[in-house]
Amino acid sequence: MNSHVFLGAFVAYVLVMIAFGWWVSRNSRSTGDDFLLGGRSLPIFLTIGTTVATMVGTGSSMGAVGFGYANGWAGALYGIGGAIGVLLLAAWFAPVRRFRFMTMSEELSYYVGASRIVRNIVAVLIYIACIGWLGAHILGGGLYLSWMAGIDLTTARILVALGFGVYCVIGGYMAVVWTDTVQAVVLFVGFIVMAIIALFEVGGFSGLSTNMDAAATSFLGIDKIGLIPALSLATVIAVGVLATPSYRQRIYSGNSVSSVRSSFVITGILYLFFSIIPAIIGMATHALNPGLDNSNFAFPFLATEILPLWLGLLLLVAGLSATMSSASSDAIAGVSILLRDVYVLFTGHTPSARRVVTLSRLALVATIGLALLFALTSDNVISYITSMIATVMAGMFVCGVLGRFWPRYNWQGAVATLVSASVTSLAVINVDSWNVFWGNPSIPAVLVALVVGVAVSLVTPASKVTPEQALKIIDDERQRMEMEEEPAMVVSGSGKTT
């Protein structure tokens, strides 16, 4: 009987979010800039709300709770890594707001003379990464909904994809940031209440060690998973934040540099305090039921089997808020890349303003559909996320850091960075002894990409395009998306129109 209640609550919640998303965005969808970036005028409270909601996503709920169930206090590493990532984002990259970039591929190509080659490679990688993130959110949300609502996994994943997909398609970026902000409040309240009740159920902090491997109760579970794998997990999450396009989109759409920086600092501090919550919930669930077949079911088990119905419903909404808020952000980021960069790669021109909103909606449907297909191939959230980040995003992280702080970096070094990071990651994943030692490929991928990027830049000619010229090349091309007629020309990587 309760399964029907949970399913009904999910459907009702999604319908409310769709209606709310339509209402707040009904006057903000006239141009591509409005639909994809909210007119670049988000106030600080919306930037905080949408960033917090995106941070506390599938990994922090389903993934980190499940990791805490299996590995104790190591469940806090996800939050610690995320907090470090967003604080570094505030310190290092908030100032790029003044350049009015639309996508991360624009930004990374700017650092190396507006190279078309780099922009094309990064665009494809970012779009793949967005599909990967979306797949992770659909995967986690589907596992969660399937358990709580008593429906099969495939149906659950389809419902989750439809849940966030509809209000994205209807309302665009403004619908996403407003619904994110509401969901941020819901999920914070829900997770904190869940942690408090869970502690009460097991008799306080001392009860968390019941049935738990003693090594898992060590500082950050290091005795259980090992120092290097612990560092790798925190690193891969930090790298993910620093290289994930949805966080860059928060920078590009913010009202000002100071607004973006302040919102990221506040988010980082909140997230650092939040990091302990998933570990507490996971460990408490292990104390109550150490025999779950899949640790990813720790969160829904506690919500449906231990807590009273009213609280379980609250936590259903909180958990799905975490999934859908992050998923909607990644969907919009992916579509921005698809229309701004991938579209140009295959058609030779940018879409005109009158077509951007329509194409954006069609692209959202296609992107979410692809992510759903990927989500049907995996059942472990943390391994899915960490492998995808290390393989696709480690190189983009290094590109961003070198480009931002080292003027000698060039397009050849950027290409070498991207290729070497992915090759290193795949090598570590496919050599069992290396994978066991590192825990995930993030650290070796970043280190190799850093060394190779610097070396190749030094042995190849420096870029002759000044930062001012590079910015003008990018600005001129992007402005074509605001023209009324379909453009016939684009700017080449050399800075000449063709």
Image (tube, rainbow, N blue to C red):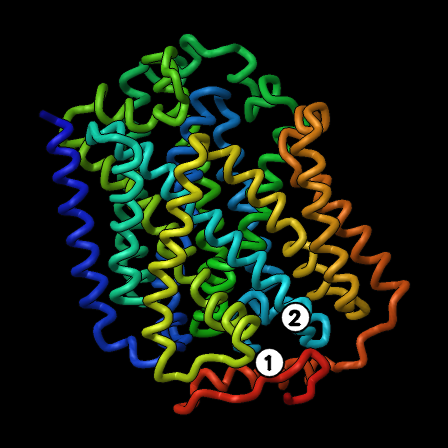
As drawn, the label of residue 109 is 2
Residue 448: x %, y % from top left: 77, 46
The answer to whether any part of residue 386 appears in the image is yes
Vertical arrangement, residue 333 with respect to residue 307, above or below: below
* C-alpha separation, residue under disc 2 versus residue under disc 1: 9 Å
- Among all residues in the image, which is located at the extreme top? 211
In the rendered structure, find residue 428 and report the number of the disc placed on it: none
**Which one is earlier in the sequence, the residue at label 2 or at label 1?**
2
> Where's the C terminus, which quadrant?
bottom right
x 34%, y 44%: residue = 322
Q: Residue 455, image x and y in percent?
A: 86, 57
Count of numbered circles in the view:
2
* Among the 4 quarters of the image, the one containing residue 61: top left
Residue at numbered disc 1 = 474
Q: Position of residue 324 (x, y in %)?
A: 32, 48
- Residue 243 placement (x, y as % from top left): 58, 55
Q: Secondary structure at mark 1?
A: helix
Label pair 2/1, CB-CB below 8 angstroms: yes
User: Looking at the picture, which amino acid does disc 2 mark?
Assistant: Ser
Tag 1: residue type? Ile
